[in-house]
Image (cartoon, grey):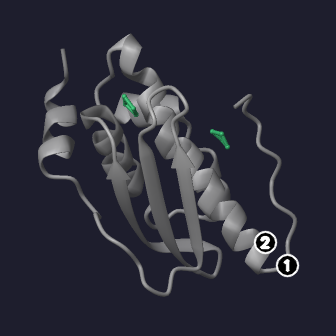
Amino acid sequence: MYSEKVMDHFMNPRNVGEIEDADGIGEVGNPKCGDIMKIYLKIRENRIEDVKFQTFGCGAAVASSSIATELIKGKTLDEAWETTNKAVAEALGGLPPIKMHCSVLAEEGIHKAINDYRVKQGLEPIPDPHAH
Ligand code: FES
Ligand code: FES
């Protein structure tokens, strides 16, 4: 049911933890299941210098969060914003259809954290393009 990559990122999640002096923090909950994710960004010159996450959720959510941190590390904020849940699922070698919603948690967390950073900088938050 799950790809090897999903299993790997679930068993050995990358970038787990907290950044004490984070520049942007995103906390999101999945309304379908109640699982939650918190993501911390350290930003320098518009680039994600460091990222850590804590996810209290299912295996697919943990794996999605883990690979999402790898996808956005070193990217500009614009590039990171474009990291869709589809890209996250693809990078994992796919997710079962009933688990696709779990990858949304990662995308949403990144969006929240970027907007948290923007607001702290005195910038407008980017409008949420999603329906939830
Ligand atoms: Fe809740 Fe996967 S079942 S995020
Ligand atoms: Fe972008 Fe909802 S996934 S804020």
Q: Amino acid at mark 2?
A: Val
| SS assignment at label 1 | loop
Residue at 19% across, 22% down: 2
Q: Does residue 55 sit above or below 132 in this rendering?
A: below
**Which residue is the site of mark 1?**
122
Q: Does residue 56 sit above or below 47 in this rendering?
A: above
Q: Quadrant of the N terminus?
A: top left
Q: Amino acid at mark 1?
A: Gly
**Which residue is the site of mark 2?**
119
* Residue 4 placement: quadrant: top left
* Residue 64 placement: quadrant: top left
Q: Quadrant of the C terminus?
A: top right
Residue at 52% across, 62% down: 75
Q: Does residue 53 sit above or below 20 in this rendering?
A: above
Q: Give me the C-alpha separation between circle 2 and circle 1.
A: 5 Å
Residue at 65% across, 74% down: 46
Q: Position of residue 84 (x, y in %)?
A: 56, 37
Q: Position of residue 14 (x, y in %)?
A: 24, 58
| SS assignment at label 2 | helix
Q: Nearer the viewer, residue 73 or 9?
A: 9
- Marks 2 and 1 close (CB-CB < 8 Å): yes
